[in-house]
Image (spheres, grey):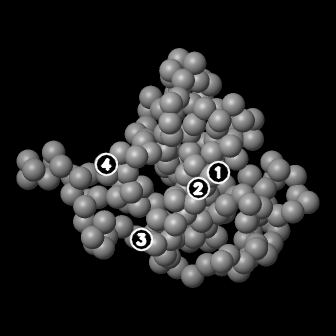
Amino acid sequence: MIAWTRYEIHIKVWLYAHGVTWVKERDIDRDKLFDAFISFSYKDQNLVIPELINVIQKKAPSIRLCLHYRDFLPGELIDQNIIRAVECSKRTVLILSRNFLENEWCMFEFKAAHVQALKDRVHRIIIIRLGDLPKESEMPKEIQMYLKSTTYLTWGDKYFWNNLLYCLPTSSSPRPETVDLNGMKQKYPVLV
């Protein structure tokens, strides 16, 4: 019992990494089109995105990712694409870097994900710290508060991939063909 209490999260991560899971998809997420929206600065795109996508799709092929360059609707306002991506995703994965912190659209993605998490009362944000970041005191207040109140992942840590895959929801239900946004049924782009 003492070992379970002390090592519970490590045991759960190890079990999940080896195909054992007892977590069921929440009712609130059943209509979500994506398992995770990946939020990142375009300046970091070549650094981590190819590896992130390849590893997730190799180790957990059923996970459906929402990516700017593939899934945003052309001709639509950027803020509407971001809000739709967050609303249609079970999690938002933020690649937190200097570039992210300096980009207004990345910060908007964080704020949209935070609002959605508060609205749904479900933890939805997974933060991955990337590279040399400024001191927390130099970061935007919203990010400071979030980093102080939640745990996060650091790119390159020994157990990074196991922990990330454990945090991502599993897809046990078929993807809906349409998404209900503000009372309007909309067909979303077909994923690869």
As drawn, is 141 to the left or to the right of 4? right
**Residue that label 4 marks:** 158
Q: Where is residue 124 drawn, in percent x and y? A: 53, 51
As drawn, is 113 to the left or to the right of 24? right
**Residue that label 1 marks:** 45
User: Which quadrant: the C terminus?
Assistant: bottom right
**Residue that label 3 marks:** 59
State the separation of the CA atoms marked 1 and 4. Answer: 22 Å
Q: Residue furthest right?
A: 75
Question: Answer yes or no: do the residues labelled 2 and 4 have beta carbons within 8 Å?
Answer: no
Q: Residue furthest top?
A: 137
Of marks 3 and 2, which one's residue comes earlier in the chain? 2
* Front residue of this view, candidates 186 and 71: 71
Question: Answer yes or no: do the residues labelled 3 and 1 have beta carbons within 8 Å?
Answer: no
Of marks 3 and 1, which one's residue comes earlier in the chain? 1
Question: Answer yes or no: do the residues labelled 1 and 2 have beta carbons within 8 Å?
Answer: yes
Per the image, label 4 sits on a secondary structure element best described as loop
Per the image, label 3 sits on a secondary structure element best described as helix
**Residue that label 2 marks:** 49
- Badge 1 local density, few (<14 within 10 Å), some, or many (20+)? few
